Image (cartoon, rainbow, N blue to C red):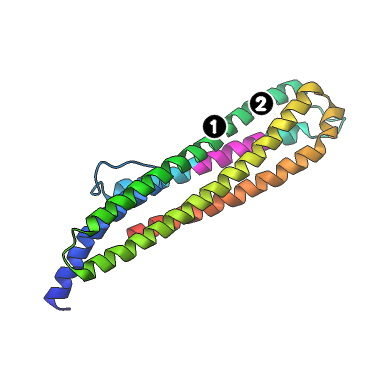
Amino acid sequence: MSLGIDRFRRSRAAVLLPLAAAGLLALAGGCSSSPTAGLDTATTSIEETGRQIDVGISRMDEVMRVLAEMDVDADADVDLAATFKSYRSGIAALEKAAASVRSRRAAMRARTQDHIEAWRAQLAELGSETAREVSAARQAEFEATANNLEASLDELADAYSALVTDLKDIEIVLANDLSRSGVQAARPLIREAIENAAEVRIRAGETNRVLTSARDEFSR
């Protein structure tokens, strides 16, 4: 490898890595005071987004478990009043998890645009056409990653909304008819909630996959 090529590659890395660090941090919903905030900070923010998604799945599993406890045969020994109270609490916790997905999505959109504008401004500071081409190509990859993650978070938020709607409908129905026959009458709603919970799990897995891909792209 010639000394000139080696020097160029080091120079290119010095430009691209700080920009990528700030960009991936924006994607994950974090904040950075400068493009040189660092790889570790960006990676940590991505991992925090993944943890928030996992918390949401855990809360979903809990509320679905409680719902299953109510949806039993008429002769089962279940304290419907106590179980229904836990069900209501579980819905409230799940709503908070769903809100965090929507909040992170909204913040990410604004920060992504800010980062792209800053990146474009720094492109003008590069001294060679080759460096500008390389950085512009990486910027395009960043925008594609941002679009993928935004779309994935949108789908996850929509899946959460559908599930929460089902769960709250069940809550209203049972609040007015908290009996074994009332639970049995609500079974079509319960089946729909189970299907939507499965969709949330699929969307959460896809979003985590996109996050992992973004982190791997950023780290390599």
Write the residue at 33% across / 52% down: 116
Amino acid bearing label 2: Arg
Q: Residue 132: x percent and y percent? A: 24, 65
Q: Which mark is residue 59?
A: none
Q: Residue 12: x percent and y percent? A: 21, 64
Write the residue at 54% across / 54% down: 206
Point out the residue furthest to the bottom here. Answer: 1
Residue 146 visible in image: yes
Residue 43 visible in image: no
Of the 4 image quadrants, the one containing the C terminus is: bottom left
Of the 4 image quadrants, the one containing the N terminus is: bottom left
Task: Identify residue for label 1.
Answer: 96
Q: Is residue 32 left or right of residue 59?
A: left
Q: Residue 168: x percent and y percent? A: 69, 31
Q: Which residues are magenta?
A: 53-64
Q: What secondary structure do most residues of the magenta stretch adopt?
A: helix
Write the residue at 13% across / 74% down: 4
Q: Is residue 174 left or right of residue 136?
A: right
